[in-house]
Image: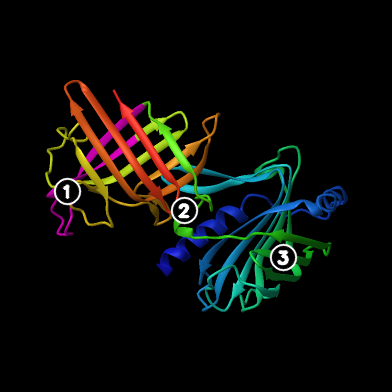
Amino acid sequence: MKTLFKRIAWLMAAVILTQCAPIERDTETMESIFEMRKNLTQAESYYLGDVNDIGTDVYDLRIMTDGVGVNYKLSSDKITLNAYKGNGYVLYFELNTGEETDAFPVGEFTADQDESFDEGTFSNAYCVVLNSGAIAADAVKLKITGGKVNVSKSGNDYTVKMDVTTVEETKLDLSYSGKIEVGDPVYIREPFSGKNIELEVDDISFVSENFDLDGDRIKESSVGKLTLTGDDGIIVINDIFDEDMYPIGKEPARLAPGTYTLTEWTYEPFTFIPGEIYKEKVDGSYAWLSDESGIFTEIFYLVEATMVVKETGNEYSVSITATSANGSTITANYKN
């Protein structure tokens, strides 16, 4: 699992840090930061594990103002941070801690001047400023190279005081107060709080391929993938196990009737697998929602689910009831 954390963490760091090139000191940019300094209202974190391979666990921290969002995209089963979007600014730090904790770590973190990634330091820090809905290269990026970040906690709320300087020696004195929830990088981009989702399905597709279950390089069974598509997003049910193998070109056109259950990779008949990030890609079964313009917004990794497929005469139906990793309940129904 730690290897998986490392792979995902390097992916997240790479896509984030290549979006915008640092610029020189800009008076208008700095003025906009201080005008919005009291408007830091959003915070999120991921536990990245020992991403630097030195025995120091790392938590990233992203703090944003109102009106700023993180624009992810799903392409070839890969989730990447496409860009920041909106108006405002983003502060990003990677906090080097002694070990994994049950909650977001507290304490004082000083700038890592020599990339030693020692405990009690922060690394790979920057501030991104967005104006007029700018994204990617239109944004202004200021690398943070000095100073301190102090994290304290009272009840369920955190206070993050940032007394830092940029590479141009511009001082930033900022503060955030509120909740900081730590996400699992195995479930990148799933919301921290649960929802109740009912997806109306307009279309379904099914593909099947022969499968080598025991690793002897002989394919003796098959697995299927069912995709249900609606106006509000898609649901993918993956690795639906079938004991039978089918000649190429004669695979089943649609999933056979029956009751299917999500299991932990048991590969038994009438089962399918849970969702997660595996080898930096979305794998298994998940729901991915989209907004009115068709842009994907939130993903939900299924960890418990039942799917009932019925065929009566000319009527074919699929019903799914599922729970995602964050506790969201998801239902979807299709009938031709």
As drawn, 314 above or below 193: above
Q: Residue at x 83, y 65 (%)?
A: 169
Does the magenta segment cover residue 207?
yes
As drawn, 63 above or below 305: below
Side (left or right) of 9 relative to 172:
left
Specify the label residue 269 is tagged with: 1
- The image shows residue 163 at horizontal and vertical percentages of 79, 67
Side (left or right) of 23 relative to 251:
right
Q: Find numbered disc 1 in the image and state the secondary structure of the residue it sits on.
A: loop
- Magenta residue span: 203-227
Mark in front: 1 vs 2: 2
Callout 2: 10 Å neighbours few (<14), some, many (20+)?
A: some
Q: Are marks 3 and 2 in contact (CB under 8 Å)?
A: no
Give the residue number, with chain letter if any, for mark 3.
159
Specify the label residue 326 is tagged with: 2
Disc nearer the start of the sequence (3/1): 3
